[in-house]
Amino acid sequence: MPGPTPRVPSATPYRGAVARARHGLVLFVLTGAIGLAACSGGSPKPSAESSTTSASTTSVSSAGSATTAAPSTSNLVVTNEIRSQLVAAGAALNSLSPSDYTGLRPGETYYAYDSGTQTYWAGAGLVPSATSTPAQVASQDDGAYLLFERTADGTWQAHDVGLAGTPDGSTCPVTVPSSILTLWGWPPGSCRPATIS
């Protein structure tokens, strides 16, 4: 008579362990994917090299077709001619000669056009000549930074704004359009960069 049939272990515990391992692996992969998505998400920071504002206006004509208007402000290249004009305007503000200055401070020059007001705007710090004491004095405090504006057919008007909006300074002598402030990354309602040298 044959003996009792040996009991074969059930495959269920093995299948359960595999299922739990797969479930854990799926959770691990999903958690990693969500983590990567969170790290790479968010809004991109504007590039310092941007040449125009990113805001465009879309309107619908009576015919029903959408049109996109060009941005109203754009950064422009500071050519040697513009650089000379800004130095001359800053020197004239202080009743000095352009030769009393050697140029514009590196890294602090801004230049743009606002088509909404048809005005060119610039901001810069002038570098006084080592041989001009009046220029060195004029380049301190409020004169440490200048804001410039001109219409398309006008000449540059310079404004001392080195201390404008600071606790020790006065209010801005001119209102800069918010589109220019946004384009340059200057604080709202200001007329100069947040920091200058």
Image: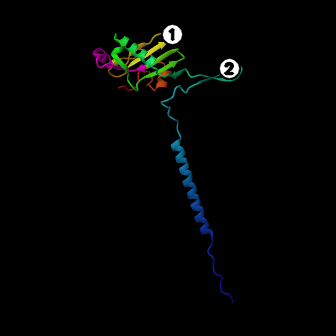
Residue at the spot x=31%, y=16% of the render?
Answer: 135
Q: Secondary structure at mark 2?
A: loop
Residue annotated with mark 2: 61
Who is closer to the viewer here, 172 or 11? 172
Residue lying at the far right in this picture: please name it: 63
Q: Foreground mark, 2 or 1?
A: 1
Q: Position of residue 11 (x, y in %)?
A: 63, 70
Q: Quadrant of the C terminus?
A: top left
Q: CA distance from mark 2 to mark 1?
A: 32 Å
Instruction: State which region is magenta.
Output: 123-141
User: Where does residue 93 sit, x and y in percent of width and height?
Assistant: 37, 11
As shown in the figure, which amino acid type bears the numbered disc 2?
Ser
- Residue at 54% of width from left, 44% of height from top? 37
Which of the numbered marks, if any, corresponds to residue 153? 1
Q: What colour scheme has been applied to the protein in the rendered image? A: rainbow
Dot 1: within a 10 Å radius of its alpha carbon, few (fewer than 14), some, or many (20 or more) residues? few
Q: Does the segment drawn in magenta span residue 135?
A: yes
